[in-house]
Amino acid sequence: MLSIFLKGGPLMWPILLCSVISITIILERFYHFHSTKPKISNLTTRVKTMIKEKKHTEALRLCEEESSPTARLLAIGIHIRNKTLEEKDKIIKQAGSKIIREKEKYLRGLAVIGNISPLLGLLGTVTGIIKAFIKIQELNGTVDSAVLAGGIWEALITTAAGLCVAIPTLVAYYYFEGKIDTIASNLKDTNLDISELYGI
């Protein structure tokens, strides 16, 4: 495996670096999304019931038992219930934007890696083929097909490596994007619930 890697040429190293960064981001984001997923069933319904019964302290305590985006936004809504309508609206919108930004952290890096990895692979292939034909020219064209094929397959290693990095990276990127879209939709619903309860 190492010998094949080394035959791919110098551009295999940035491709390897891309793979390490991609794996790191994917694992970190998986951990983040797992650690902040909802743990309390029917949280919004239970909180709304408590608030209607004027049990604000109990509702806040319930929200603080987990770190899901919905729980965080509900907790903020309870904290600012006595502020003016303008202040509440501004704070809730800022909090929602902050939560989404936290979810999107490092995803731009995944997108970049997913796009440049195959390009690095292609560049490695092109430079490898150029070197192979330069060698043929130096030998006055007296090179058999086996030598030419060997030079080409070595050059193609970088393209294969780039695609092997790019494909799972882009799959993970779109998976996380889908999760964020779902969270954003839930936060919008939570915002409406807070507006209904506190007149924002």
Image: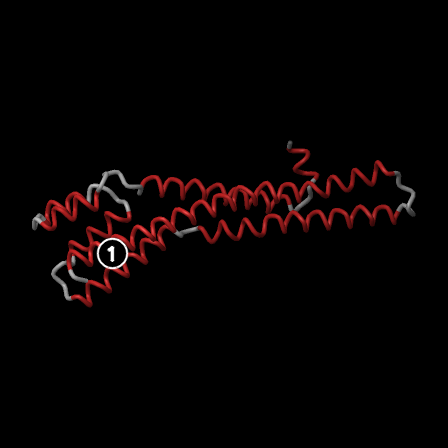
Instruction: Left or right? Give the position of 158 relative to 22.
Output: right
What residue lies at 61% left-to-right and 44% top-to-bottom?
Answer: 162
Q: Secondary structure at mark 1?
A: helix
Q: Quadrant of the C terminus?
A: bottom left
All told, the count of numbered labels is 1
Q: Give the residue at x 53% y 41%.
A: 168
How many neighbours does mark 1 have within 10 angstroms: few (below 14), some (14-19), or many (20 or more)?
A: many
Q: Nearer the viewer, residue 33 or 51?
A: 51
Residue situated in front as seen by the camera: 116 or 41 = 41
Q: Is residue 55 left or right of residue 77?
A: left
Whether 52 is drawn above or below 5: the answer is below
Q: Is residue 171 above or below residue 101?
A: above
Percent position (x, y) of residue 118? 62, 48
Q: Quadrant of the N terminus?
A: top right
> What scheme was used to colour the molecule?
secondary structure
Q: Is residue 182 left or right of residue 39?
A: right
Dot 1 corresponds to which residue? 191
- Residue 144: image x %, image y %? 88, 38
Q: Which image quarter: residue 93?
A: bottom left
Percent of width and height locating residue 79 = 15, 55
- Residue at (73, 43) in percent of width and height: 155
